[in-house]
Image: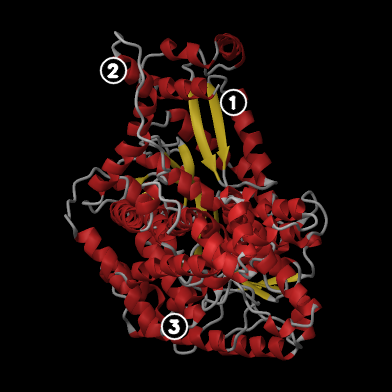
Amino acid sequence: MAILAILALVLAACGGGGTGEDATTTTGGAVTETTAAEAATTTAAAEEPAEEVTIEWWHIQNTDPMMTLWQDMANEFMEANPNVQINITVMENEAFKAALQTNLQAGDVPDLFQSWGGGGLREQVDAGLVQDITDASSGFIGNLNEGAVGLYNVDGVQYGVPFNLGMVGFWYNKDLFAQAGIDAPPATWDEFLEDVQALKDAGITPIAVGAGDKWPAHFYYSYLMIREGGEAAMAQVTETLDFNTPEFIEAGNQLQRLIDMEPFQAGFLAAPWDAPDGESGTIGTGQAAISLMGQWGPGAYANQSGIGTPEDPIEERLPAEFGWFPFPAVEGGVGAATDGFGGGDGFAVGKDAPPEAIQFLEYITAVDQAIRTGETGTTLPVTAGAEVSVTDPLQQEVLEGLGQASFVQLYLDQYFTPELGAAVNDAVATLFAGTATPEEVTESITAAAG
Amino acid sequence: MVISDPQVKVTRPNRIVRRAPGTAPWPVIFAFLLPALALYTLFVLYPITQSIRYSGYDWNGLEPLTDWVGLQNFRDAFADPLFIEAITHNGIIIGLSLLLQIPFAVALAVLLTRNLKGRGVFRTMYFAPFILSEVVTGVVWRQIYRPDGLFDQVLAGVGAGDLSREWLADPKIALYSLFFVISWKYFGFHMVLILAGLQLIPTELEEASAIDGASFWKGFRYVTLPLLGPTIRVSMFLSIIGALQLFDLVWVTTKGGPVNSTATMATYLVDWGFRRGQFGFASAVSVIVFGLSLIVALLYQRFVLRRDLEGALTT
């Protein structure tokens, strides 16, 4: 079976630019005949029997409701376009990254695959592994959020389509804040540190962080970089790759102030993001009050809480009432308090993908479908008119924060090349472990960039 | 990426191909060897050659191989304190295994050859961890070691709660916590090897020494241990090779963290290959690991196993 499937794939890929019927026998003759017949009778678009194509689609929405929703949408698209076969491969985030790397090296590029844009996409562009869809997508891409679309644009050429855009902020447990006598979320970094102290004094673990996975820790450092240096400093470092600037060292100093308070859960240096013993588990079971995370945070806390079933609304599955506040302003920093840090999800289009793959992206980002993704409470759709679907009060707060942001910096570990991104994450982890000073952090990142 | 896997050379007599007179053996031999040889070439020799080739390039795994840098990747690797640290960690695991794990296995094996009630049960119990996969072991122990997990609760239960540590999260002790898991998993295997060795020692020799008035300790020291020599040396060899290749368990429990405190050569090279996408550099590291393992294996065979390979029975 597997060999047949691969064969079908190879032939379908080879037949992509050809004239037609030669590829039809591979995926099973019976299916072909019936679908061709249906196509002829049902849709006007298929006046000639359309060529059989297969779309390999890799995504990382490996939990419900999104996993089922993607499958539903693929089924709908296949029904409407009987000549199209969509093969979905669902993987967990880290597993996906490793598997994709292997496939890319072998030149066996999935037709549609999860992408965060940034430096990783640029490397794929340089290697000619992704497809220029500027023209093919021009009919619908204008309906999508410009900032999100821009993440998949390298040097003016479009290589992918976003479906989700959010930003990182502080999720907090309102019950624990009340217990510590905190009545309003902090507006400045100093107030934030005071609240952390108040939580500690009340015997509550203030913060959970998955520093073992490193990227959750890099959120703190990145946000402080943005608050200290603003858009200008980020533009400059993109150009010079020199992190040894007063702003970034000061960002490290500010983070050091937080780390010195020992605000994190026991064993945070080994904790991953999403596991019972990780950041999401600690927050989901009410054992810590604050988590700096993106829009997907509450869904993960709810999955680890052990309360209710996945069908229940997220707020009913959390251990307490939760709230969200943006990363506070930092005194003396150049960056605006409304500047955001985050990113989105989208699908890059592989080099051999058939035109139908882009039509499928048009389908899933069309307003009706975007509304369905928004209604899950786990996704912030980027299609104009789909904002109304975000009814989850927590997600509405993120959306509001995003709306106020005039500048949103992409996650640094995606923004730079994978090598430099890893260096940023590793260096920040040493700061959390207390084995490096803020100066050593900027020096080691700069050294890796050189 | 290649992690070397030198096989243990088991002593065997020089093989003489016996053939009926008048047959031409070579084509036949070749025909039988061909499938294995083809697989070996495809999955061992070819990847090794490719790794060596990639190791000379600055290559992110995606673009064509164009950026030839000669030996620069090797120089970079040895100049990286984190790689030296990773080698050191492998060295520490080797040292601790030889000093603690193997003597413990010998002691248990000697204990379990005596007429102990239920020794079959003990043997099975001690061997059981070995049949678990490393990944399963890692997942289970990560939960046992987590803060306020089973390990801490047992300590608290016996009134030793003060000894609780952040077993995997404290960079100072994470490596030793992992060594404990490695020992837990593999001591049973070494115990079984040594049990087999013990059974090969004729009981007459031990009886004779006892009749001559040797205490248990002297009998063990001067009769049993020398005769166990070949088995222990093979056991040590397997332990060294295993420690050089240490990967799965570390990757599942700590991924080499926190802050590289449990990084091994193998986690270092996977990190550079798959996380950073520096496949040229990672290939250079894999060649270094291969070379180191080969040197260790050859030296061990040359200087430690030589007499065993020649068929000597004692030290």
Label 2, label 3: how many angstroms apart (C-alpha)? 70 Å
Task: Assess disc 1: are there few (<14), some (14-19) or many (≥20) residues with their C-alpha within 10 Å of its C-alpha.
Answer: some
Q: Nearer the viewer, residue A136 or A208?
A: A208
Q: Nearer the viewer, mark 1 or mark 3?
A: 3
Where, by quadrant of the figure, is residue B53 drawn?
top left
At label 2, counting other C-alpha atoms closer than 10 Å, the crowd grade (few under 14, some 14-19, many 20 or more) is few
**N-term-proximal mark, 1 vs 3:** 1
Q: Quadrant of residue A133?
A: top left
Please state the chain letter of the residue tagged with numbered disc 3 in the rendered image: A
- Residue at 52 percent across and 89 percent down: it is A257
User: Closer to the camera: disc 2 or disc 3?
Assistant: 2
Quarter-of-image position of residue B186: bottom right
* Chain containing the residue with disc 1: A
Q: Amino acid under label 3? A: Gly
Percent x, y of residue A216: 54, 68
Query: Can residue A379 be seen?
Result: no
Residue that mark 1 sits on: A78
Q: Quick one: A188 or B104, which is closer to the camera?
A: B104
Q: In this rendered view, identify the residue nearer to me: B87 or B300.
A: B300
Q: Which residue is mark 3?
A: A252
